[in-house]
Amino acid sequence: MAQPQPRMGAVDLRALPGIPMVKLGDDLATLIGEGLARAGLELRLGDVIVVAQKIVSKAEGRTVDLASVTPSARAIELAAEVMKDPRLVELILSESVRVVRSRPNVLIVEHRLGFVMANAGIDQSNVAPQDGVERALLLPLDPDGSAEALRSKLSASAVVIIDSFGRAWRRGTVGIAIGAAGLPALLDLRGNPDLFGRILQVSISGFADEIAAAASLVMGQGDEAQPVVLVRGLTWSAPANPAAELVRPAAEDMFR
């Protein structure tokens, strides 16, 4: 059955002010609630809270001290090829199910969650305080579960957790959804009419990815320190499905 197309005339995106540096054990729902209060905002029906993956991972303790990592022989060999720290490569391999491509300064893998991405999403930017400890940040264990837990605590309509991804055949990174709750991450528009009444045959919208890309413009990529964005004005009526639905199944992958 066709899912009704959302009709939106305007969408408002606002970064929540004053979100502090997040650390292990912090209650993100409380921090977001305080950010809403500082902005003089209250959540409305249909509001979407978009959260940067980094603060979710930090709160969940997904930070690893590289000094605690012992690289395997495979990691050492691959690290020499891609010119990366063998300890970092060991972490990448531990979070991955296969290496897709490798070359100097590039390591593309299939993450255990199905994402095909650079370095298994492991990051070292905006991670460590200046205490001399080298740290790396892993993706959340269950981003969809993290989004649902946050949505429930906030009593929000929807939550999307986003990260910055590169794309095959295109330069530059964009924000994409790695976790979602409360909305259709994947919106199947097949069966709906186009402007002239022709029935759509293949149109499936990455609804959560579109939200993520828009919110990423507000969050920024560097020192902006705006990891939470309120998105207002979106509408949807289709049933919710998780961000995991955005991952193309292997059977549909023509390039595998």
Image (spheres, rainbow, N blue to C red):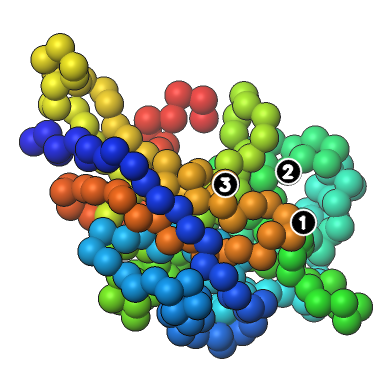
For residue 28, say whether it is visible: no
Which of disc 1 and disc 2 is earlier in sequence?
1
Q: Position of residue 74 (x, y in %)?
A: 78, 54
For residue 175, say whether it is visible: yes
Which of disc 1 and disc 3 is earlier in sequence?
1
Residue at which label 3 appears: 217
Q: Quadrant of residue 126?
A: bottom right
Q: Quadrant of residue 57?
A: bottom right
> Label 3: how many residues lie within 10 Å, few (<14), some (14-19) or many (20+)?
few
Q: Residue at x 19, y 28 (%)?
A: 190
Q: Residue at x 58, y 41 (%)?
A: 174
Dot 3: element: helix
Dot 1: element: helix
**Cα–Cα gap, marks 2 and 1:** 9 Å
Residue at which label 1 appears: 89
Q: Residue at x 50, y 77 (%)?
A: 38
Compared to 136, does 189 lie above or below?
A: above
Q: Are marks 2 and 1 in contact (CB under 8 Å)?
A: yes
Dot 2: element: strand
**Cα–Cα gap, marks 3 and 1:** 30 Å
